[in-house]
Image: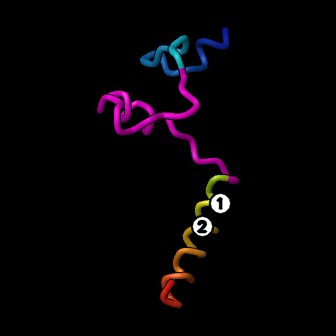
Amino acid sequence: MTIKQLFDPSKNINRSIEKVITYGVSQEERLKSEISEYVVTDSIDEQFESLLLKMEAAMDIGG
């Protein structure tokens, strides 16, 4: 078995992967592809939860 066989065959594993994506100028299909491949790690999940809790607290006190 090769490493390539571990990946989804419908995806081009040799394509360019952007670190930062400018959504305003990107094509819709490109955005769909990027979003469908996004992986939420435990760390990202914790950071999102922390951010949302802080936003909720700020809104509760009128911030």
Residue at 40% of width from left, 30% of height from top? 33
Mark 2 and mark 1: Cα distance apart in space:
6 Å
Q: Residue at x 55, y 82 (%)?
A: 58
Range of residues picked out in magenta: 17-43
Extreme residue toward the left, this view:
28
Residue occupying image coordinates x 29% and y 32%: 28
Residue 24 locus on image (x, y percent): 35, 38
* Total numbered labels: 2
Left of 44 or right of it: where is 14?
left
Q: As rendered, which of 22 and 53 lies closer to the eye? A: 22
Viewer-side residue, 8 vs 57:
57
- In this rendering, the answer to whether 24 lies above or below 8 is below
Secondary structure state at the residue bearing disc 2? helix
Amino acid at pointer 2: Leu
Quickly name the residue at label 2.
51
Assess whether residue 20 is covered by the magenta stretch: yes
* Residue, disc 1: 47
Residue 37 relative to residue 45: left or right? left
